[in-house]
Image (cartoon, rainbow, N blue to C red):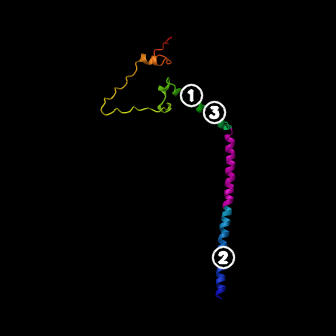
Amino acid sequence: MVAVLILLGVVIVGYISLRQVRTAVQTMADQTTELKEITLQTQQQMDLLVQNLAPVEVLPEFQQSLENMNEGVFELTTTLCASPLFSAQCPRDELPTTPATTPAPAPAGTPAEAPAEAPTPAEEEESSPDTIPANGTTTSG
């Protein structure tokens, strides 16, 4: 008799569990149907969006053209900033990087050297004959 009651209890618990699983599966099926409808509506909206955006299909080519122009301008800027004639107008981060040499410190017992004087405009003109004089006249030489 006890065994029959235990088996009856197992059957009742199993039946309740099966009903819960059935309810969960039905709920999931309803949600899947709703999700399918939402997906179809989204697909229709996306198709409409693609049709509306069709005139701007040339943008990838335009973007590639802009990237090419950007590379060309960068190369031109680098070339110009490397020139001593234009380097004064370039930002510091555009200038070509050359390692700066630092003078060795003077020994403790000797007097420090006087700083070098800036060259006069005439000396500067003689040292760099490739530059155009500031007054706009040309030198024949």
Which tag is nearer the camera, tag 2 or tag 3?
3
Residue at the spot of label 2: 14
Q: Which residue is mark 3?
A: 65
- Of the two numbered discs 2 and 1 on the same chain, state the one appearing first in sequence: 2
Q: Nearer the viewer, mark 2 or mark 1?
A: 1
Query: Tag 3 or tag 1, which sits nearer the N-term?
Result: 3
- The amino acid beneath tag 1 is Leu
- How many numbered discs sit on the rendered protein? 3
Q: CA distance from mark 1 to mark 3?
A: 16 Å
Question: Where 119 falls versus 106 (above or below)?
Answer: above
* Residue drawn where x is 69% and y is 42% of the image: 51
- Residue 13, horizontal then vertical, whole percent: 64, 77
Return the residue found at the far left.
109
Give how far apart the Cα atoms at labels 2 and 1 are: 80 Å
Closest to the observer, 129 or 135: 129
The magenta-colored residue range is 31-54
Query: Which residue is the site of mark 1?
Result: 76
Q: Give residue 104's position: percent from left, percent from top.
A: 38, 33
Could you tell me if the residues under marks 1 and 3 are in contact, i.e. CB atoms within 8 Å? no
For this rendering, which residue is in front, 108 or 4?
Answer: 108
Label 1 element class? helix
Q: Residue furthest bottom?
A: 1
| Residue 94 belongs to the span the image colors magenta | no
Near-viewer residue (109 or 34): 109
Residue 45 located within the stretch drawn in magenta: yes
Query: Looking at the image, which residue is at 61% across and 34% down?
Result: 67
Counting from the top left corner in percent of width and height, residue 22 is at: 68, 69
At numbered mark 2, what does the secondary structure look like: helix, strand or loop? Answer: helix
What's the amino acid at mark 3?
Ser
